[in-house]
């Protein structure tokens, strides 16, 4: 673990970092390296004289150079590689650079470009980062976790790489996702990166292309399942709880058979969160609340079709349904406002292979008895749209172009302003392009996408496209839970996170504006979400911490800023 300690000057409140790491080791430790910003005194104290050019630069000067280097790359994947190389050499410089160009660079380090990086992980592998725990090492989980670099851990993001974005099982390559998520936590939520830990649980892969690739770096084995898998996860969570009793555990990109089960299994034992379900649900609901408000309607009056009944699709449906209940419907009434389709088409109560979370939204077959359809045993999306006449259409299918012109024009016949959310990413998996949706709805559409899109022109008006980016949600949720040392995350806290985000919707002030704020506002959004979550944690008596009266100021002061601290050498003798 890194040898670091902090002291504060009581007269100036200036923090100083103490460490015994010197020389080349200091320059190659990304969490501590300042490069050309080491002062003359620090260069003497840490044996750096002659190891750097003589000029002493400020962080701002370094950012100017780094931005020029970034712009020298034309290809987005090369830009991703450059930023990750910077992250692996000078962590503070990386965060300062990206924070100043957040809207431009977040899509490069996070979705959608991270999906490309995941697929190339084994062949492009350069530097170790995070912790890998493979199933054959099940007896060594505790010792592996003790090998981490950062000593104090507030936040863990963990994956097993089975359900990565819209590209499926990527095995050990899934590690790029927790790394990227933690970057976003620090950039948007002010979580100190020295208090975070990305983890990949390598339980094998069912991706034969990876298993046959001689360069693949993961465990060459089919994915374990059943009791073996459950026991492995149990031992992992128990060890995390033992070593980090107040940690916030974030599950990411688990397969549909395990994602919800893991969350429900441990949500009362550790403060935990699944972004694919809960984060996606909150940001999508916030966009929908803004759209419904723009239509002068109510959430309880919506008819919702969800195309793609996996982890994300059902998680979104859950959040919308809970909002309907919050606004006065019974649970049974709210469930009747949803029609969910998956690979077999419209889901029925007697459909084979239904998961327990899909069963809630499955319909009775007698409901479709009067529909004019070609194949009652496989009811397609166009059939559902024509007969249900939805006001909201959500895509979580990863089926490129699934929202065809016929489907969208049919939907537009029956609603004044169709709310359409093609959320699958990466971009090539999107159900429809915004430009087409504006054309097919004669400009009536209210839209948010999963991937970023450039503004479009329609009838002489420029429309910015809202992105349902989880980066607007999970950093603030995590910050609020960490500051309060919450024992668990409640559904009510997620509702308050959603309403806090919805207040930032630009369409509230301009009918032509997007449904969600720009990413450049993400840090301000996170601070308000954190306050909403923290207040709810306190209202629920869901913490053992003694919190100050001025919670708003505490959250603000807690948010980490990328800046260099003065260093002082600490001898271990």
Image: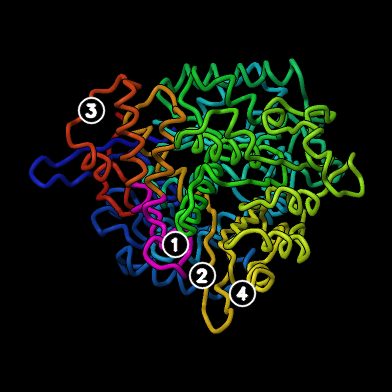
Q: Which element is circle 2 on?
A: loop
Q: Which mark is residue 518?
A: 1
Q: Earlier in the sequence, mark 4 or mark 1?
A: 4
State the residue position of label 4.
Answer: 74
Q: Position of residue 81 (x, y in %)?
A: 60, 60
Q: Quadrant of the N terminus?
A: top left
| Quadrant of res 277 | top right
187 or 533, which lies in front?
533
Residues at discs 2 and 3 in contact (Cβ within 8 Å) = no
Q: Which element is circle 3 on?
A: loop
Distance in Å between CA atoms under marks 4 and 3: 48 Å
Residue 349 visible to an observer of this rendering = yes
Distance in Å between CA atoms under marks 2 and 1: 10 Å
Q: Please identify, in this view, whether the residue under mark 4 or under mark 2 is nearer the observer.
A: 2
Q: Position of residue 522 (x, y in %)?
A: 40, 55
State the residue position of label 2.
Answer: 464
Q: Position of residue 176 (x, y in %)?
A: 61, 46
Residue 510 among those drawn in magenta: yes
**In the image, 82: left or right of 24?**
right
């Amino acid at each position: 673990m890194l040898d670091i300690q902090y002291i504060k000057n009581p007269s100036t409140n200036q923090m100083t970092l103490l460490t015994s790491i010197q020389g080349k080791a200091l320059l190659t430790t990304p969490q501590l390296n300042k490069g050309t910003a080491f002062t003359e005194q620090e260069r003497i104290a840490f044996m750096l004289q002659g190891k750097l050019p003589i000029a002493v630069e400020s962080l701002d000067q370094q950012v100017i150079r780094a931005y020029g280097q970034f712009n020298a790359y034309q290809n987005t994947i090369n830009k991703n590689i450059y930023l990750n190389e910077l992250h692996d050499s000078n962590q503070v410089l990386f965060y300062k650079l990206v924070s100043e160009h957040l809207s431009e660079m977040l899509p490069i380090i996070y979705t959608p470009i991270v999906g490309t990086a995941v697929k190339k992980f084994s062949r492009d592998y350069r530097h170790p980062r995070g912790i890998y725990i493979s199933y054959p090492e099940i007896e060594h989980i505790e010792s592996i976790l003790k090998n981490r670099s950062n000593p104090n851990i507030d936040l863990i993001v963990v994956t097993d790489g089975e359900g990565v974005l819209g590209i499926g099982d990527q095995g050990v390559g899934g590690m790029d996702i927790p790394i990227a998520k933690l970057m976003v936590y620090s950039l948007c939520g002010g979580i100190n990166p020295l208090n975070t830990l990305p983890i990949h649980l390598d339980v094998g892969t069912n991706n034969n292309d990876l298993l046959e690739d001689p360069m693949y770096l993961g465990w060459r084995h089919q994915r374990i399942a059943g009791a073996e898998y459950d026991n492995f996860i149990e031992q992992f969570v128990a060890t995390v709880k033992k070593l980090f009793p107040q940690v916030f555990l974030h599950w990411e990109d688990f397969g549909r058979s395990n994602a919800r089960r893991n969350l429900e299994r441990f949500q009362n034992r550790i403060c935990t969160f699944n972004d694919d379900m809960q984060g996606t649900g909150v940001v999508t609901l916030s966009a929908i609340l803004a759209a419904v408000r723009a239509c002068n309607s109510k959430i309880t009056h919506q008819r919702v079709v969800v195309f793609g009944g996996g982890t994300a699709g059902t998680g979104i449906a859950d959040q919308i349904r809970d909002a309907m209940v919050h606004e006065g419907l019974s649970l049974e009434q709210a469930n009747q406002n949803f029609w969910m389709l998956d690979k077999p088409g419209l889901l029925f109560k007697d459909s084979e292979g239904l998961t327990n979370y899909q069963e809630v939204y499955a319909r009775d077959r007698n409901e479709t008895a009067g529909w004019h359809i070609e194949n009652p045993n496989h009811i397609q999306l166009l059939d559902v749209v024509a007969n249900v006449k939805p006001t909201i259409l959500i895509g979580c299918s990863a089926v490129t172009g699934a929202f065809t012109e016929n489907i969208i024009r049919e939907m537009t016949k029956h609603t004044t302003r169709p709310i359409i959310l093609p959320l699958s990413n990466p971009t090539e998996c999107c159900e429809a392009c915004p430009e087409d949706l504006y054309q097919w709805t004669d400009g009536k559409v209210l839209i948010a996408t999963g991937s970023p899109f450039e503004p479009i022109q329609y009838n002489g008006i420029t429309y910015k496209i809202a992105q349902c980016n989880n980066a607007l949600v999970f950093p603030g949720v995590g910050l609020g839970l960490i500051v309060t040392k919450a024992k668990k995350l409640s559904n009510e806290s997620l509702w308050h996170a959603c309403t806090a985000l919805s207040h930032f919707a630009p369409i509230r002030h301009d009918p032509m504006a997007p449904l969600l704020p720009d990413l450049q506002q993400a840090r301000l959004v996170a601070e308000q979400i954190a306050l909403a979550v923290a207040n709810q944690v306190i209202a629920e008596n869901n913490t053992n911490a003694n919190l100050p009266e001025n919670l708003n100021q505490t959250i603000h002061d807690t948010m980490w800023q990328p800046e260099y601290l003065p260093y002082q050498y600490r001898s271990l003798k």
